[in-house]
Amino acid sequence: MLPFVLLFSAFFIAPIVYAVNDSLFSTKSSGLGFGAPTKTFVFLDNYIAALGNPSFIESLGRLLAFAAIEVPLMVVTAVALALLLDSASARFPRLFRVIFFIPYGVPGVIAALLWGFLYIPATSPVLQVLSLAGISVNPLSTEGVLFAIANIALWGFAGYNMLILIAALNAIPSELFEAAKIDGASGWYITWSIKLPLIRPSVILVTVFTIIGTLQLFVEPLVLRPLTAAISSDFTPNLAAYNQSFSQGNPSLAAAMAVIVALLGFVFSFGFLRLVNRKGEKAW
C-alpha cells in the first residue's frame, strides 16, 4: 500500500493542508510595492470576508439550486438507462452501452464548447428549426442557464453512472429472477421488488458521486461565460475563487472560498449517507 499512500498524501492530503494553511494568512505588499510581499496570520478573517461577500453567498445559493436540478435528474436517468439495457427485451445492449458511455470520454471543455454552439441561435440548427416554427428558446438566458449547464453535465456523466449500476445489476444472481418468474411475477414487479432494492448501495454511491461533482461545478460556466451575460465572474463558488486568485490577486481569500466549498461537500455527502443509512435501518 506504500505507493498508494505516498501518491494519496502528495496529491490529495498535501493540497488540502496547503489550502487550509493559506486561507489563514493574508498576503500584503510592503512599502510602495517594491519589496517582497509579506504574509500575515489573520486566522478566520478570510472566511468572514468570504461569507460576508454577497456575490459569494449568491453563488452558494445558485450552486444549491443547480444541485437540486442535477442530482435527481442524473440519478433517475442513470437508473433508467441501466434498467433499460438490463431488461430482457433490450436489443444490442453492448452497442448502446458504448454509445451512452462515449460522452464521458469527451473532455469537459470540449463538451461545453459543443453544447455552447448548440445553445446559440446563430449556430444551432435545432434553435433555428424551432425559430422557423415560431418557437423562441434561449437556453443561455438568466432563467434557463442552470438547466443548460445541467444538460451538459447529464450528457457527460450519465453513461459513467449507468455503468456502475449495470455492474450491480449483473451481480444479482439469475436464480432470483427465475424463481420470481416461476411464481408469476411481472417484469415491473421484478424491477421494483428485486432489482432496485439490490442495487440500492450502487444508487447511493452514484448519488454521492453526483453531489460531489455538482459542488465542483467550474468548467461549464467558465466556457459558456463569453456566450451569455447570465454567467458572471462569480457565478459559482469555484468560479468566484478562481476570479479572486487569478484576477483579483487574492489567493488567500480564494483558498478560504475553496475550503468552504469542500466543507459543504463533506456535509452534504455524509449527511446524505447518514440519512439513507438511517432509513435503511428503519426498513429492516
Image: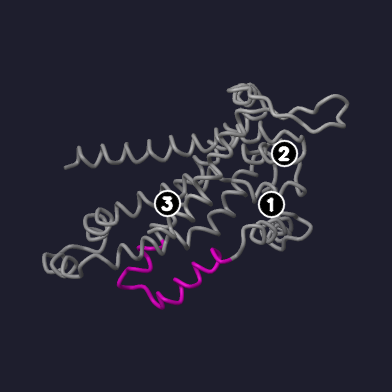
Which amino acid type corresponds to the residue marked 2 in the rendered image?
Asn
Q: What range is drawn magenta here? A: 81-105
Neighbour class for label 3 at 10 Å: few (<14), some, many (≥20)? many
Neighbour class for label 2 at 10 Å: few (<14), some, many (≥20)? some
Instruction: Provide residue 109's location: percent of width, then percent of height.
Output: 66, 58
Pointer 3 residue: 75
Which amino acid type corresponds to the residue marked 1 in the rendered image?
Ile
Pointer 2 residue: 243
Question: Dominant secondary structure of the magenta stretch?
Answer: helix
Residue at left 29%, top 56%? 199
Residue 116 as seen in the image, left or right of residue 170: right
> Marks 1 and 3, Cα distance to the nearest angstrom?
30 Å
Residue 39 as seen in the image, left or right of residue 261: right
Instruction: Provide residue 185's location: percent of width, then percent of height.
Output: 17, 62
Give whichever of discs 1 and 2 has the lower sequence position: 1
> Marks 1 and 2, Cα distance to the nearest angstrom?
37 Å
Looking at the image, which is closer to me, 193 or 275? 275
Pointer 1 residue: 135
Give whichever of discs 2 and 3 has the lower sequence position: 3
For this orientation, the residue located farthest to the front is 35
